Image (tube, rainbow, N blue to C red):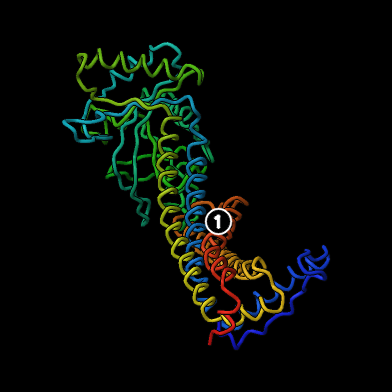
Amino acid sequence: MSRNSVTTPPVVASPVPGEPPAQNQRGLLVGVIFRAAFKALQANRLRSFLTMLGVIIGVGAVIAAVTLTQGVSANIDQRFASLGTNIIYVIPGSASSKGVQTGLGSVSSLTIGDASALAGVGNVTAVSPVDGMSGQAVYRNQTWSGGVYGVYPVYQNIANWQIAEGAWFSSGEEAARASDVVLGATVVQTLFGPARADPIGQTIRINGQVFHVVGTLQAQGKGNDNSIFMPFSTFQQRLSNTSFLNQINIQVDNVNNVAQVQQDITTLLEQRHHIQPGMADDFRAYASNQLIQNVQSSTSLLASLLIGIAAISLTVGGIGIMNIMLVSVSERTREIGIRMAVGARRRDIRGQFLVEAVILSVLGGLFGIIIGLAAGYELVQVVQIPFVVTGFSILLPVAVAAIVGIVFGLYPAALASNLDPIVALRAE
């Protein structure tokens, strides 16, 4: 800020030399300091805005990152809430094979015999094998592509699917290998939405095979709704060309028994698959709560990474504030000398420059909140997750911005207050 562009504010001097001013006089001085700080910043609006830009970007990035992370976390909670915490999933594949991570479907190891054996484990109330494949369904001139799964009738209870219309297939239909299917909400909308037809009782073709729609499901989540379910025996006979399973879903009677049942399942399958001690299992057993914890842990790690990157932006913004305040001290050296000559104390000079730095930082934080919320809203709309905003996610960046202003403004303020008044008055 040019020293010629800033009006020197009046200074309330102590009525008696060496004594502090009265309380009301001190309050007046604080107000004067704030007014002088705003005038100094307004004198060079463009430079002040460019100085705030680093803080604006940093705070905006923090807000956007936190909003995105909270939205992802809320979406995960919604999608897993219906699964309960008493479900165990057994999938083929070992945790690692010769140092290489493997996963679902990497090894064909689970059979219908395994599913039947697991039904006899203590505290297990329901077991359903799951076999699936990518399929294409056709109704009139409408085509759908997605996952087609063969499951037992008890799968509805295990996965907590709610019927929207019609009914789930029964045990009798499983035994008779009935050509009945139940459609997810996305499938219904894709195949029957354009024609505005009632799907119940309609005939569709899946991979060239004819099936009858007996039920539709309530929406459960974007990915889950894009599915078709049919009796396991029907799927094995008409669509599947393998005797191996994609996974086995197991329901436990009580959440407190999940850990024990998980251990019993592991022991039983190791015996059935002839896995000796020291050998890697060719399957993996997960509890649903473990899956939730793993996903949330990954989400938290991503949030920490994003916030760390944003913190770098805030640091850069703070360095920018320090740089400009040092320039301001250099430009206003004579002004500082005049103020000291008419009675301003060193702490008054220090307070004014510190206030200017904090104002730059806090204003940058406020603008950053607006930009961050707008960016966060657009991001969650693109990925279709909830828009979650908490007071903590807004107040924290502003508090951090204020701290940045204090930390990076302290040195220039101290430098200004320590100037020799005589030397300062001689400055050009």
Circle count: 1
Q: Quadrant of residue 345?
A: bottom right
Q: Residue at x 44, y 43 (%)?
A: 300
Q: Position of residue 347 (x, y in %)?
A: 65, 65
Depth check: 227 or 301 in front?
301
Q: Which residue position is annotated with label 1?
A: 400
Counting other residues with Cα less than 10 Å from the Cα at mark 1, is it few (<14), some (14-19), or many (20 or more)?
A: some
The answer to whether residue 290 is above or below residue 425 is above
Task: Determine whether, in the image, residue 42 is placed left or right of residue 293.
Answer: right
Q: Position of residue 268 (x, y in %)?
A: 30, 13
Q: Quadrant of residue 244?
A: top left
Q: Position of residue 172 (x, y in %)?
A: 42, 23
Depth check: 132 or 417 in front?
417
The answer to whether residue 148 is above or below residue 5 is above
Q: Quadrant of residue 11?
A: bottom right
Q: Tag 1: residue type?
A: Val
Q: Residue at x 60, y 76 (%)?
A: 421
The answer to whether residue 7 is above or below residue 320 is below
Depth check: 282 or 9 in front?
9
Q: Residue at x 44, y 16 (%)?
A: 124
Q: Position of residue 232 (x, y in %)?
A: 34, 29
Helix, strand or loop for disc 1 = helix
* Residue 173 visible in rendering: no
